[in-house]
Image (cartoon, helix red, strand yellow):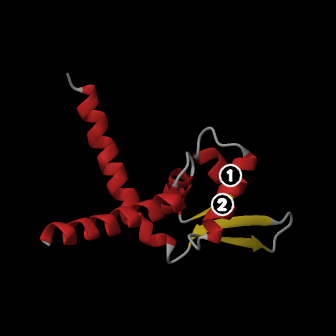
């Protein structure tokens, strides 16, 4: 019976990971979230420069997806010319810890791979 309970809990955990990956999957979303974690508010062109290799079209699509999932807020500023600014929502800010852990793991992994 304990084995069955473990399987149910494991399935819940895996489903939660699947849900998270569904929202953050792809080549660019985590990088976009990371740049907004480190810079708070960014213009479209700033994010485009921060996320090396992403196209205008893909950045626009990914920002819309992140906005739809309530992770990113888009603000049109009343300036001439009109400027658009992006920032993490309060909910999106909950990913700061995840980004920090990913960064720490990436640094440790790079060291591990480089050492002989």
Residue 22, percent from left and from top: 52, 59
**Residue tagged 1:** 59
Residue 36, percent from left and from top: 54, 61
Viewport quadrant of the N terminus = bottom left
Relative height, residue 6 to residue 105 (above, below)? below
* Figure quadrant of residue 52: top right
In what element is the residue under mark 2? helix
Relative height, residue 108 to residue 30 (above, below)? above
Q: Residue at x 26, y 70 (%)?
A: 9
Q: Is residue 35 left or right of residue 1?
A: right
**Residue tagged 2:** 63
Relative height, residue 61 to residue 77 (above, below)? above
Q: Is residue 71 left or right of residue 56?
A: left
Q: Residue at x 76, y 72 (%)?
A: 77
Q: Residue at x 81, y 74 (%)?
A: 78
Residue 4, percent from left and from top: 20, 69
In what element is the residue under mark 1? helix
The Cα–Cα distance between marks 1 and 2, rounded to whole angstroms, is 6 Å
């Amino acid at each position: 019976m304990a084995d069955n309970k473990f399987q149910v809990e494991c399935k819940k955990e895996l489903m939660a990971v699947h849900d998270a990956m569904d929202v953050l999957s792809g080549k660019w979303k985590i990088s976009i979230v990371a740049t907004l974690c480190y810079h708070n508010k960014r213009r479209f062109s700033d994010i485009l420069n921060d996320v090396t290799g992403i196209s205008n079209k893909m950045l626009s699509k990914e920002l819309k997806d992140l906005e739809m999932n309530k992770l990113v807020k888009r603000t049109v500023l009343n300036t001439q010319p009109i400027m658009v600014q992006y920032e993490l929502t309060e909910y999106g800010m909950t990913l700061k810890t995840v980004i920090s852990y990913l960064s720490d793991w990436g640094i440790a992994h790079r060291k591990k791979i480089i050492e002989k």
